[in-house]
Image: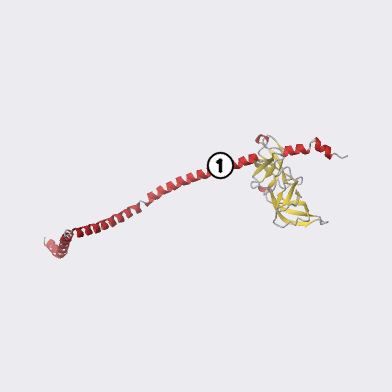
Amino acid sequence: MRKLIEFIRSVYVVVLFVVLEAVAVSYYAHSTSYTQARLLARSNQVAGGVRGLFAGIRRYFTLGSENRVLLARVTALEERLAAYEEAQTAARLDAYMAGIAESKYRFATAAVVGNTANRAQNLLTLNRGRGDGVVEEMAVLSPDGAMVGYVIDCTERYAVVLSVLNTSFRASGKLAGSDYFGSIYWDGLDPHQVVLGELSKYADPQPGQEVLTTGFSQYFPEDVLIGWVESASLNENRTSYTVRVRLAAEMTRLVDVVLVENRDRFEILDLERSEQVKQHTRLK
């Protein structure tokens, strides 16, 4: 009891001050309507601040769940975007393939199941044959569109390709940006190079210049990339260039290829072999 009296004696001044302040504030608050409105506004402001503080604290502790919800939404949107892009790509491919179907060239793909590069007569074997629409004399390109060779024989399931790295291979090639052309062949030396021979002395080939197909060949479309000029030298009579060309196709690393058929090839061959043409070309 004595300690309680001592405690009350030590704090009664503070308690009395608080009680008097409360009475004064109550009297002031009820003195006029203006003061009541001001105190109400201030109390609402303080209460709003306190509620905002606690709301911020609650929001902080719920950030994890909110992030998970946002992540799920982002994932759903990404899936929808991927589906949209896939649909757009499919539409573009359909349009592209429709355009191809209307052109004079027909395209197919195949995998390389056999390949040599260390002989004079190198060949490739493909896992597609007549049953897949492959026919003799189809051009064969690398996946990025560079010259590889052309089909020389087929079975129902397989095809054999005369590689550009074959000393029997022949095609026509030209320097990019010019009308000068010559004969493409392999001399059996370097599996990364072929030769562009019989090129006009006026051609002026430059190192790094692209070498392309001419379109004169019955096998290859025009402007198929063959490679790039590495070096050039005039023959002894200084009438033509012999150009060494770095192949664009990695012949020793081929996995897949693209086959190209000229739809007009048989019509052109039949015309060139017609009896009328033979009559005009027969020696007299």
> From the viewer's perspective, is residue 27 above or below residue 264?
below
Residue 186 appears left or right of 30: right
* Coordinates of residue 20 in the picture (x, y in percent): 15, 62
Residue 53 appears left or right of 157: left
User: Residue tagged by mark 1?
Assistant: 91
SS state under label 1: helix
User: Of residues 125 and 273, which is closer to you in this image?
Assistant: 273
Quadrant where the C terminus lies?
top right
* Coordinates of residue 15 in the picture (x, y in percent): 16, 62
The quarter of the displayed image where residue 231 is located:
bottom right
- Which residue reaches farthest right? 284
Amino acid type of disc 1? Ala
Residue 12 appears left or right of 243: left
* Coordinates of residue 146 in the picture (x, y in percent): 67, 48
The quarter of the displayed image where residue 138 is located:
top right
* Coordinates of residue 54 in the picture (x, y in percent): 30, 54
User: Of residues 95 and 54, which is closer to you in this image?
Assistant: 95
**Residue drawn 83% across the image and 39% down it:** 280
